[in-house]
Image (tube, helix red, strand yellow):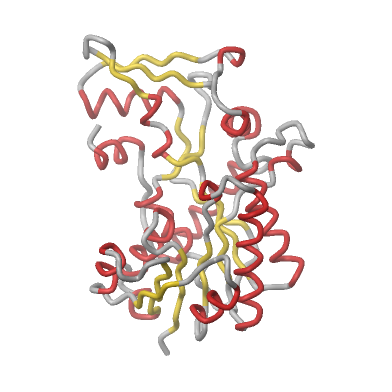
Amino acid sequence: MTKLITVFGSTGNQGGSVVRAILNHPELSKEWKIRGITRNANKPDAQALARQGVEMVSADLNSKDSIQSAITGSNAVFGVTNYWEKASLEHEVQQGKNLTDACRAAGISNLIWSTLPYVSKITNGKLHNLHHFDSKAMVEKYIRQVGQPASFVMPAYFMSNIPGSIRPSADGSHFTLSWLFHADAEIPMLDVPRDFGKFVASTLSPEPTGQHTYAASGWFTPLDVCQAVEKCTGKKCEFNEVPLEAFGGSKELLDNLLMIREYEYYGPGAKEGVRKSHEVVEKVGGWEGFGTFENFLEEIGI
């Protein structure tokens, strides 16, 4: 019997990747119907999904009634929230609780939550400004507390965050990459459009695991990034390590970078978590290989 997955943020970065992964999979596309949730089901990108067979529905994460109506009849729900919409930890946590409560009321058997590490706890309060991580982890804690069956997928550092740090020289002869890392620092990175949906789709099993899936395309260093730039552009790329005292960004961004530099982004067990998650994706979904930074640059056309 065909099952139904409801995907929040279906026209966005993460949700869109989930939709494509299922639609393009020879088996999952037959086993699962997709209901896409968006604020406006009439906008062009929502209508484009509708033409591909996705049932598009409007819903608001600020309203439990709206959510419950949208997820009725679903076997699984993929949930993602946008901290930057309000830049408020409290607002994002409430949206996550609304989704959780609606899933419990509707009897959803697998809430797949896009979560992140609980940074303030992992670092014993050393890094306490990374609110868009902690907010999602707080929702995960709530999901577990109320007993909602769930799977948890943790996206790695977005590759799309990096091009802003790659700058052409004044004469256009080469590029520079300036970053708050050592040249050989290994960073778990994710090509969201290409790979994120694979990790989410791998959790579509009869019984949710309640475990973390580490959604990372791979581990890449600043030197790997520069090499990819050189391959894609034919121009030299120089890496410059920015001293901690010279960093001029926000406290939130600083803690984000320090979480990568000092705690491998995910915290203890990061390497093993990524390795096991890759094995699951390849075994369950049959996907082979993940995106590289060179793939990503080719896609965006640097």
Q: Position of residue 228 (x, y in %)?
A: 31, 29
- Point out the image quarter for the N terminus: bottom left
What residue is shown at x 61% (from left), y 62% (from top)? 95
- Point out the image quarter for the C terminus: top left
What residue is shown at x 40% (from left), y 49% (from top)? 192
- Number of dots carrying numbers: 0
Q: Nearer the viewer, residue 210 or 271?
A: 210
Q: Nearer the viewer, residue 56 or 121?
A: 56
Q: Is residue 245 above or below residue 90?
A: above
Q: Is residue 31 left or right of residue 67?
A: left
Q: Nearer the viewer, residue 151 or 62?
A: 62
Q: Position of residue 53 (x, y in %)?
A: 28, 77
Q: Is residue 134 above or below residue 95?
A: above
Q: Nearer the viewer, residue 99 or 181?
A: 99
- The quarter holding residue 171 reads top left
Q: Is residue 153 above or below residue 55?
A: above
What residue is shown at x 56% (from left), y 18% (from top)? 247
Q: Position of residue 187 (x, y in %)?
A: 51, 33
Q: Position of residue 214 (x, y in %)?
A: 55, 51
